[in-house]
Each structure stands twice: as C-alpha cells, then as structure tokens.
Image (spheres, rainbow, N blue to C red):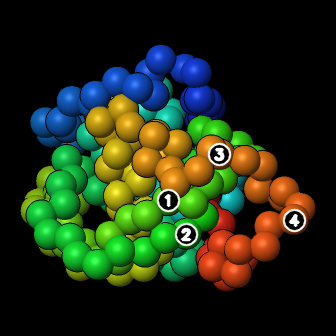
Amino acid sequence: MAIRKIREEGDPILSKVCRPVEKMNLRTKILIQDMFETMYNAYGVGLAGPQVGVLRRLCVIDVDGEHPYVFINPEIIEQSGEQTGEEGCLSIPGMCALVTRPEHVKVRALDLKMEPFELEADGLLARACCHEFDHLDGIMYPSRALEPIHPVDQEGEADAEAEAAEEEKL
Ligand SMILES: [Zn+2]
C-alpha cells in the first residue's frame, strides 16, 4: 500500500465529472487500498477518486475508524430530513464551513466485488456520503456552504450548534 498525494483546491481535476468504474481489476483494488491508507494517514473520514487524481466514480468512507466502506458508482436513491454542521475537506486543509445535508440517505452502490448493495445512513455517515459523492461530480462543499469557508481554529465562534458539531475532514 502507499500513501497518495491528495489534490488540493485549485487543481482542475477536482472540478471534473468522473466516469463509472466498469470492472474491478488489480489496479483498482490497489487504488482502493491506497485511498484508505491515504485517508487514515490524513485523519480524514472519507476520500473520493478525484482527490487522488483518479477520475472514476469511487470513494472510501470510515466515519468511526471501525466501519470502512467502499462505494463504487454510488447514487443516493432516497433522502430525508436535514442536518446543519461544520464540514471540512482533505482537499481544502485547515478550513471548514457550515453545510446543510440530508439527515438520512439511502445509497445504492457496488462493492469491491462489483456486486450491488444498499445502505441506509444517518448523521455523519449520511453527510460523508453526500460530500464524497459530490466529489464524483466535481462539486466541492464551499459551493453548498451557508457561509464562506474559514479556518478551523477560528476564535470567537459563538454558534452553539457549530460548537456542538464535530468538524470532520471528508
Ligand atoms: Zn472532500
């Protein structure tokens, strides 16, 4: 396994729409292993293909360090409710902003064996799915944020909801 370079905001690859993964092969398996290693190394909870320079519809997510998920060609087939909280991104280090996302999503995707599965996700996992799947369409969270992005450690943050929300790097 290897840690890959994480592309940062301003890199044109991050605004491109990814193509579907058509079949699983050794190269893609290694890519996915590398994406997990790169994500954990950066203390992130999610990482999408374009963030490591690969314009394919796949991402990895692990919001609690115990439940690693691989999503290939994912789509959100149902969503409900809403949650507003601080969101960050490994491609925009040190910054965050409030973003409203659905509280609950139902996801359909392919797994490592290219077999379809569905997942119901709430809270942070739902947020991570929305954030990562956006990356596959070249969408970064600042375009969905309720406010300008700002440094994570900014003093004077008085918003109780923002303080209560965990800032996560996706
Ligand atoms: Zn991100």
**Amino acid on which the number 2 mark rests in the picture:** Gly
Locate residue 150 relative to residue 104 in the image: left or right: right
Q: CA distance from mark 1 to mark 4?
A: 19 Å
**Disc ID at residue 133:** none
Choose the circle earlier in sequence order: 1 or 2. 2
Q: Residues within 10 Å of mark 4 (few under 14, many from 20)?
A: few
Locate residue 60 relative to residue 102 in the image: left or right: right
Q: Are marks 1 and 2 in contact (CB under 8 Å)?
A: yes
Locate residue 170 relative to residue 68 in the image: left or right: right
**Disc ID at residue 99:** 1
Query: Looking at the rendering, which quadrant does residue 11 occupy?
Result: top right
Choose the circle earlier in sequence order: 3 or 1. 1
Residue found 70% across the figure and 81% down from its top:
160
Q: Residues within 10 Å of mark 1 (few under 14, many from 20)?
A: many
Q: CA distance from mark 1 to mark 2?
A: 6 Å
Residue 21 rendering spot, x and y as whole percentages:
20, 37
Q: CA distance from mark 3 to mark 4?
A: 15 Å
Q: CA distance from mark 2 to mark 3?
A: 13 Å
User: Which residue is denoted by mark 2 in the rendering?
Assistant: 85
Residue found 35% across the figure and 74% down from its top:
82
Q: CA distance from mark 4 to mark 2?
A: 17 Å
**Disc ID at residue 156:** 4
